[in-house]
Image (cartoon, rainbow, N blue to C red):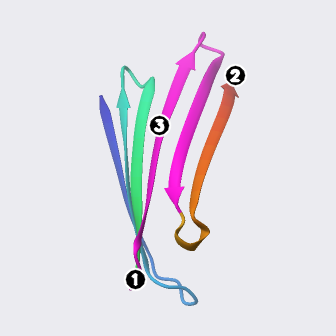
């Protein structure tokens, strides 16, 4: 099992301050991934994101990656994203 974390702070001149916190847990020899994160806007509510991923290598040269994510986008409601990648 491998755990990765991230912390970021943005303070742009023309936008509100943002704190971004996220993490990923890789399970089963980095085949299955669980991800989560939050965005904290200064004087605003938080937005949460969650996701899962799957990576499988057919050989040393070829593989496949499947990812799915859900994000709370505030006024824009929710977003579901899916991706498929072939590696070579």
Q: Are marks 1 and 3 in contact (CB under 8 Å)?
A: no
Q: Are marks 2 and 3 in contact (CB under 8 Å)?
A: no
Q: Give x and y (percent) for residue 25.
A: 35, 37
Residue 79 within the magenta-colored segment of the rendering: no
Residue at image location 69% in from the left, 22% down from the top:
88
Q: Which residues are magenta?
A: 43-72
8 relative to 65, above or below: below
**Disc on res. 52:** 3
Residue at image location 40% in from the left, 75% down from the top:
45
Q: Which element carries disc 1, helix, strand or loop?
A: loop
**Crowding near pointer 3: few (<14 within 10 Å), some, many (20+)?**
some
| Residue that extends furthest to the top in the rendered view of this protein | 59
16 relative to 10, above or below: below
Residue 66 within the magenta-colored segment of the rendering: yes
- Number of on-image labels: 3
**Crowding near pointer 2: few (<14 within 10 Å), some, many (20+)?**
few
Q: Which element carries disc 2, helix, strand or loop?
A: loop
**Disc on res. 88:** 2
**Disc on res. 42:** 1
Q: Which element carries disc 3, helix, strand or loop?
A: strand
Mark 2–mark 1 Cα distance, whole angstroms, equals: 42 Å
């Amino acid at each position: 099992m491998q755990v990765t974390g991230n912390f970021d702070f943005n303070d742009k001149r023309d936008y509100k301050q943002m704190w971004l916190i996220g993490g990923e847990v890789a399970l089963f020899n980095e085949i299955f991934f669980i991800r989560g994160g939050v965005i904290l806007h200064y004087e605003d509510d938080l937005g949460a994101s969650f996701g899962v991923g799957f990576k499988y290598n057919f050989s040393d040269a070829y593989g496949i990656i499947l990812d799915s994510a859900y994000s709370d986008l505030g006024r824009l409601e929710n977003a579901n994203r899916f991706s498929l990648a072939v590696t070579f």
